[in-house]
Amino acid sequence: EVQLVESGGGLVKPGGSLRLSCAASGFTVTNAWMSWIRQAPGKGLEWVGRIKSRGDDGTTEYAAAVKGRFTISRDDTKNTLFLQMNSLETEDTAVYYCTTVGNPAYFHLWGRGTLVTVSS
Amino acid sequence: QTVVTQEPSFSVSPGGTVTLTCGLNSGSVSTTYYPNWYQQTPGQAPRTLIYNTNTRSSGVPDRFSGSILGNKAALTITGAQADDESDYYCALYLHSGIWVFGGGTKLTVL
């Protein structure tokens, strides 16, 4: 079955760090464009960033709100995508979804999300 | 700053037709932004409805259709059903290689 399962969410203090994981099954993350999208409580969807497939140079791109603080990476041996979040702010509180990026330029497969709460 | 605009809320009668729109504060939406649409019910992950302006995702009923209407992308629901009551989000892929979501439209079917 093709699916994405996020984990790693939780409560963290402002200024802290957290790493989210997204375990993929049924396909290889190496060969996929992947993205992270978040949703603050009661708010709309917000694109966070994406990583290209290794064959398409594997580069990353980020939304202005997280650039310089968040980093997307993957572990091919574990078939897992990561989101490293540093210098967290209360405004980063959200459910974080992992998605595949379909061709052209849309969010195809979604995980169920993991909740990150930034609070003192 | 690029802002994608959607109607905050809309209402449709069961069996009726409704068109939700997705605009840009900086100009017109065209197919080059690859407009896509997502449906979300409370507590659930979004579901992909439409991509590349007008292509339905697998399993999406044909009462959902996408288009460009004037200077906006549009999602039309024909023959609305009670379980279409959801939040609907559009997303545009900007030429800078990033995506921006609209604020979402809360659709009520009554």
Image (tube, rainbow, N blue to C red):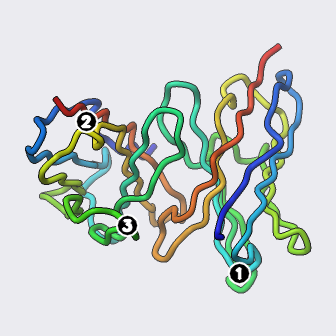
Residue at which label 3 appears: B59
Residue at which label 2 appears: B7
Pointer 2 indicates a residue of which chain? Answer: B
Residue located 37% across and 60% down the image: B36
CA separation in Å, label 3 and label 1: 24 Å
Q: Are labels 3 and 1 on one chain?
A: no
Pointer 1 indicates a residue of which chain? Answer: A
Q: Give the side of residue A108 with respect to residue A52, left or right.
A: left
Residue kind at label 2, given as amino acid type: Glu
Residue at the far bottom: name it: A55
Residue at the far top: name it: A120
In the rendered image, residue A106, in percent from the top left (x then y), is placed at: 47, 65
Residue kind at label 1, given as amino acid type: Asn
> In the image, which disc is placed on residue B37?
none
CA separation in Å, label 3 and label 2: 26 Å
Helix, strand or loop for disc 1: helix
Residue located 38% across and 46% down the image: B89
Foreground residue, A109 or B29? A109
Q: Give the side of residue A11 with respect to residue B75, left or right.
A: right
Q: Give the side of residue B75 with respect to residue B57, left or right.
A: left
Q: Are labels 3 and 2 on one chain?
A: yes
> In the image, which disc is placed on residue A31?
1
In the rendered image, residue B102, in percent from the top left (x then y), is placed at: 39, 43
Residue kind at label 3, given as amino acid type: Gly
Helix, strand or loop for disc 3: loop
CA separation in Å, label 2 and label 1: 37 Å
Q: Decide: is A96 above or below A25.
A: above
Label 2 CA crowd tier, 10 Å (few <14, some 14–19, many 20+): some
Foreground residue, A11 or A73? A11
Residue located 21% across and 55% down the image: B74
